[in-house]
Image (cartoon, rainbow, N blue to C red):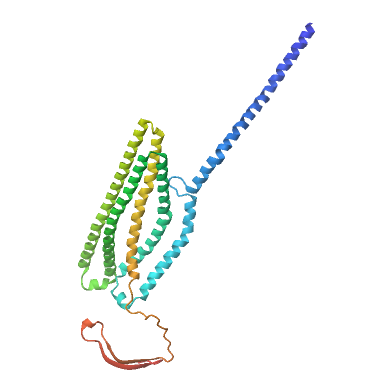
Amino acid sequence: HVAHTAAAAGTALNSTLAAAAAAPAAAAAVVSGGSARLLAPFWVLFYPWVFIYLAAFLLRGGSGSEGLLADIRDILWIPITQAAFCRISCAVFGHLLALDLNFHVHRKTGQIMRILDRGTSSIQDIVNIILFNVVPQMIDIVVACSYLATKMQPWVAGIVLVTVSSYVPLTVCITERRGKIRKVMNALDNERESRATDVLLGYETVKYFCNEGFELAQYDKATRQYQAAEYWQLAFLSLLSIVQSMVVWIGLAAGLIVCVWGSSRGTLTVGDTVLFITMMQQLYVPLTYFGSYYRQVQKALIDMENMFELLATAPAVADAPGARSLRVSEGRVDFQEVVFSYSPLLGQPVLKGVSFTAHGGKTL
């Protein structure tokens, strides 16, 4: 009996030791099984959403960066801008070479170079702003307004509509006024630059007649006139910023009053109020840039106006329509009773009834 009891005790001890030895393996299996159960939700959550967010962040970029798509766009846009700049510059310069001598005798070199420089750069700015800034932001504004109109109360949609519809016209009106001042600034700037260039080109003449003080006084007068126009230009810019801020504040305050009233009556929730604030912030940011882009486009159009006026200048001496190319078979020039004067207003002509013949290959 004692031996049987000892054998049973030994068997029980061996079973306990075996169970203890198997416990770590079972625990590892549980942990391994638990890891397998946790692994599936991780990939389900990571792959569709986190992966898409990381891809979008790479393409769009974060705060303060443009992103991969914008960098690729800039690289592809470089040859286009260079080709446009080359064609426009060559077209204007070729037109200047085609003008008559009277234009070049009376031209203001500094003013013409200023017009050429501003006009060519303005065309590039307009195309860049409209294609890559105005059109995408207009789409953003339409989407934001539509979402607020469908998800919130009609009063909220009305407030957004009134805010946007008043923001844009006020921006346009003040910017138009600034545009008129900009034209005056361009004229004064052209005059100031032209005077400085002409004085430097005619330095010897200025020294011969001791006109240094006079030319300096004239340049100072032109600079002060330009600064006076620039003051009103900057003043209207500040006024535009104040008006835009007031419109945004009034729209935001009216919308918050409606949201808080709806929350107190149970028709809206606190989440709807947060949604309204977030969406309005997303809406007003493009509107702010829209005003800035409108000012840039208008400034570029004004800068282009002088260049188009220069291109519209017709030469005083030009070929008749349908004129054929001159073919010379025998070189000879006959002058018969030639009368020449520099200007009919100057009185007597320089040449009176001059006649002679110049044969080809000979010298008079």
Q: In which quarter of the image is residue 232?
A: bottom left
Q: In which quarter of the image is the C terminus?
A: bottom left
Residue 299 image position (x, y, % from top left): 33, 58
**Residue that protrudes farthest toward the front in the picture:** 154
Seen from the viewer's position, the closer of residues 188 and 277 is 277
Q: Percent x, y for residue 297?
A: 35, 57
Q: Is residue 270 visible?
A: yes
With respect to residue 313, does 44 lie above or below?
Answer: above
Please name the residue shown 22% across and 62% down the image: 220
Q: Is residue 279 above or below residue 169?
A: above
In which quadrant is the N terminus drawn? top right
Q: Residue 228 lies in what quarter of the image?
A: bottom left
For residue 308, which quarter of the picture? Answer: bottom left
One can see residue 113 in this view:
no
Residue at the spot 22% in from the left edge and 73% down from the top edge? 208
Q: Residue sitting at 35 percent across and 56 percent down?
A: 296
**211 and 90: which is toward the camera:** 90
Percent of width and height locating residue 323? 40, 82
Residue farthest along the top direction in this orientation:
1
Query: 90 or 9, which lies in front?
Result: 90
Question: How many marks are shown on the rendered structure?
Answer: 0
Could you tell whether 197 is left or right of 133 in the image? Answer: left
* Residue 166, position as x, y percentages in the image: 31, 48
